Image (spheres, rainbow, N blue to C red):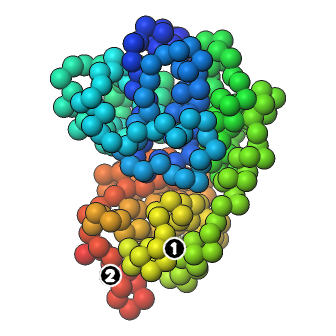
Amino acid sequence: MHTIAKKIHNEVLKAENILIISHKNPDGDTLSCACAMMQYLRSIDKNHTAFCATAINKNLAFLPHIEYFIIDPAIFQRARFDLIIVFDSGDLTYAGVAEHLQNLPYSPIIVNIDHHPTNEMYGHFNLVSPEAASTTEILHHFFKINNLLIDKYIATALLTGIVTDTTHFTNPSTSARSLKIASELLRAGANLNLIRGWTLKNKKLAALKIWGKVLSRLYKNEQYDMAITVLTRADMVEFNLPDEEVDGLSNFLNHLTGAKIVLLLREKEDDTIKASLRTTATDVDVSKIAQAFGGGGHAKAAGFTIKGRLIEENGEWRVI
Ligand SMILES: [Mn+2]
């Protein structure tokens, strides 16, 4: 890990124009990585652009430089990047850039910084550690090994990734190391109050009403010891809410006892269904289930996407 982190830093120093990528449908971890990196690249006057294939979550608007994210893929034609850093993505399809990178008429160096155990090691440099609770933990290691200054903006961003990926230090990926890094980041000036405010006190009335609807649909599949519920497009239209307003629902469902696995099926606009799997059981690895459906993730939190729509039949939901 040490040598790879140093080699990556050398590539950063050599590069003329860097593209930072946060995965599509971005979460707090991938955005925090990109924002911490933007703060560093600005401090050394390095040309860079941050790209995400889908809209940026407004729930994290406090992250430094998040307003500079570009979501228009025309950037791949318009500019030439010699170094591409992908954060928090097990593969390039999950990142939302597989096609864009395939179609490039040149071959940039690709850096893969991630903590998904299903990571495909697609980079020329892979800084991957499945033991890390968040990718920002790994990026923290990158900053430390290379003796880079962790200012209060970088510290706040790195801590945000840990807070969101550990669900506020409550899920099983929370480790002695995550807590130690969190404490170092607080000492470096990270603003935990700010993070708490933006990540916990952010629910709109309409969002909680949708949560209510989704919670009322919960049922249990005894055979798989699985609690299942769904969120339909019609719900989102009825309450006129952007997708990001229901983020956090699957983590909340994971508070449930009496079922080993929780499955949330969510209809997306493009006739696909996004499945989120959660478990707190020590003997269940939901990433295996996700992989069987072409997805991936972590042992305790994973997901996949399938084509189809949801229909209700006698209180149970089916995919058609
Ligand atoms: Mn992550």
Of badges 2 and 1, nearer the viewer stands 2
In the image, residue 316 sits, relative to residue 296, either above or below, namely below
Give the quadrant of the C terminus: bottom left
Q: Is residue 312 visible?
A: yes
* Mark 2, other Cα within 10 Å: few <14 / some 14–19 / many ≥20: few
Q: Nearer the viewer, residue 74 or 192?
A: 74
Can you give x and y, in whole percent of width and height, for residue 210 in the image? 54, 76
Can you give x and y, in whole percent of width and height, for residue 118 in the image? 41, 40
Give the quadrant of the N terminus: top right
Mark 2 and mark 1: span between their CA atoms?
Answer: 17 Å
Residue at (53, 65) in percent of width and height? 246
Q: What is the residue that sits farthest to the bottom in this orientation?
A: 314
Q: Dot 2: what SS?
A: strand
Residue 61 circle label: none
Can you give x and y, in whole percent of width and height, for residue 100 in the image? 25, 35
Residue at (35, 65) in percent of width and height? 268
Q: Is residue 88 visible?
A: no
In the image, residue 135 sits, relative to residue 170, either above or below, namely above
Residue tagged 1 = 227
Answer with left or right where residue 217 lies relative to residue 21: right
Residue tagged 2 = 311
Whichever of labels 2 and 1 marks the residue nearer the N terminus, that label is 1
* Mark 1, other Cα within 10 Å: few <14 / some 14–19 / many ≥20: many
Q: Is mark 1 within 8 Å of ligand 1?
A: no
